[in-house]
Every structure is written in C-alpha cells, then in structure tokens.
Amino acid sequence: MFTIIVKENTLEMASAAFEVLKEVLDKKPDAVLGLATGSSPIGLYKKMIEDHKLTGRSYKDVVTFNLDEYVHLDRNHSQSYYTFMKEHLFDFIDIDLKNVHIPNGNADDFDAEVMRYEEELSKFHVDVQVMGIGSNGHIGFNEPGTPFTATTHIEALKESTRNDNARFFASIDDVPTHAVTMGIASIMKAKKIILLASTSYKAKAIAAMIHGPVTEKCPASVLQNHPDVVVIVDKAAASLLADEGH
Ligand code: F6R
C-alpha cells in the first residue's frame, strides 16, 4: 500500500522523510535501517545529522544494511558506496561501524560475498528501508527484468543506469559495469519503505510504479504488493500521477 506525499522541494521532502523515520527511531532506538546512496536520500541524511546534533539522538544501537555497492571498487575509492555513506552520514552520527553492513565490492569470491550478505541480512528484520528509484524503475540495483524472487546477487548495470551515474565519475568508462545488490525479495521483507524521488526525470518511473502493471519490466512496481510504502516526491516527479492532489 502506498502513502503518497507530494512536496514543493527536496528540503521539504527530507523533512517529511525524517518525520517517518523519527517515528520508527523514537519507538525503537535499536532499529534496523535499510539505507541507500545516490542523490535522493542526501537531504534525509542531513536531517538525521542535524537532529543528532540538536537532540543528541543516539545511533549506537542502530543496525544498518545498505542496498548495494559497485563491483571492483575498493571501499576507499571516492565513489564507493562505503565512502558515500561515511561522507554523507556515518562520520557525523555516533553509529557503531560494527553495526554497519555494506556489500564488499572488492571481494575475491563474489559467490561467497552474495551468500554472506544475504545470510547476515536474514539474521535481522529491516524496520524501515530508505530508497530511491532509477529512471528505468530499478530499486537497489535490480534492473528491469530481474526476477521478483531474487535475493542478494550481482547485477549487470544497464547502459541507462551507467549513464545516469556517470555524473559522479570522470568519464562513462570509469562507471562500474556491475554491482552487488540486495534482491527484490530481500527488499520486500522490510516492514516499512520510504521511497524518495524528485525531478521530472523520475516522473515516468513513479507513475509506472504506482499505476502500471506489476511487472519485472518495472522492478519498483512490485512495491504495489508491499503493505507499507511511503512515497515522498516533489511535484515534478508526481506530475504523471493520476491524482496529483495527494
Ligand atoms: C542506490 C540505489 C539506486 C538509487 C537510484 C536513484 O543505493 O540503490 O537504486 O536509489 O539509482 O539514484 P538517485 O537518487 O541518485 O537519483
């Protein structure tokens, strides 16, 4: 079930997302959070840091699982998702890095790594999963065509995704071709999902997720089968929704 919140700008989106997250953290200071990288959650992470400084809210008992990591990027590479999480969140809150889980993009044995990550994840129950959506409807790095039954696996990135992410690299050739990602089945186990999307570039994917058929061609459409998804969008991303007046 979707709860759709349409906001004026990314600042207001971040505040709305933080309100939802705060409700979970207030009740459960040792909550298990699913986290994402990319542009969409940055405002929310800023809010979390601000709140931590202002109220002293502690993250020392919080456990986190990130959705994905690029393959063949060392975790200390400037564009690894490990570096992203340190620079946008972990370095500014009191999280215990022992409780942080991000797939190892530089594993010697990727079969073992995907099994290890899924096994670790299965020991917990994600209370709230924060995520963005790809312009092609991907969630995590589950690209169109990925079976809904997939658990953590290696995914070949579509050219459109590599192009979308090229803005963070010196050239398209530097964008990794593969990622380790939580699967759709793993993501669907989260008790609650907060999905953030802004700009008209995401409008088609948001409309397909909410109104389109549930099909592996649009991985995010599977969320129609999830009991609690809070979709937080700006007006541009909401522009193709049937009832924009949410
Ligand atoms: C990132 C992730 C991706 C992004 C998506 C949107 O961890 O899993 O699915 O959420 O590609 O990226 P942005 O937010 O940069 O538009």
Image (cartoon, rainbow, N blue to C red):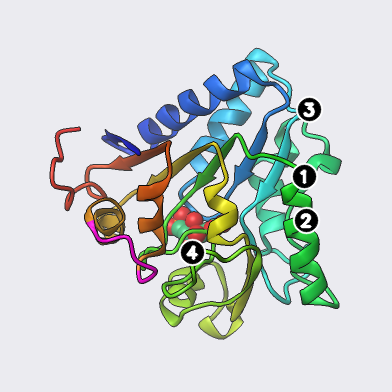
Whole-Å distance between the Cαs marked 1 and 3?
16 Å
Say the numbered circle drawn on residue 119: 2
In front: mark 3 or mark 4? 4
- Marks 3 and 2, how far apart at CA: 20 Å
Q: Residues within 10 Å of mark 1 (few under 14, many from 20)?
A: few
Q: CA distance from mark 4 to mark 1?
A: 21 Å
Category of crowding for the residue at label 3, using alpha-carbon neighbours closer than 10 angstroms: few (below 14), some (14–19), many (at least 20)? some
- Asked if the residues shown at circle 1 and circle 2 are in contact, with their CB atoms under 8 angstroms apart, the answer is yes
Q: Amino acid at mark 3?
A: Asp
Q: Earlier in the sequence, mark 2 or mark 4?
A: 2
Which type of secondary structure does the marked residue at label 1 adopt?
Answer: loop
Q: Considering only order in the chain, which callout, 1 or 4, is on the residue closer to the N terminus?
A: 1
127 relative position to 236: left or right: right
Q: Specify the quadrant of the image occupied by residue 97.
A: top right
x, y percentage for residue 134? Answer: 41, 62
Q: Which residue is mark 4?
A: 148
Please report the bounds of the magenta region as a residue range. 212-217
Q: Say what amino acid the circle numbered 4 marks.
A: Phe
Q: Residue at x 53, y 59 (%)?
A: 184
Residue tagged by mark 3? Answer: 61
- Looking at mark 2, is its residue's CB closer than 8 Å to ligand 1? no
Residue of label 1: 123
Q: Residue at x 69, y 63 (%)?
A: 78
Q: Position of residue 212 (x, y in %)?
A: 24, 59
The reply to whether the residue tagged 1 has its Cβ within 8 angstroms of ligand 1 is no
* Residue 81 in which image quadrant: bottom right
Please give the name of the residue rendered at 46% of the width and 49% of the height, measured from the top-left corner.
Answer: 40
Is the C terminus in the top left, top right, bottom left or bottom right quadrant?
A: top left
Marks 2 and 4 sit apart, C-alpha to C-alpha, by 18 Å
Q: Which SS does the magenta portion mostly show?
A: loop
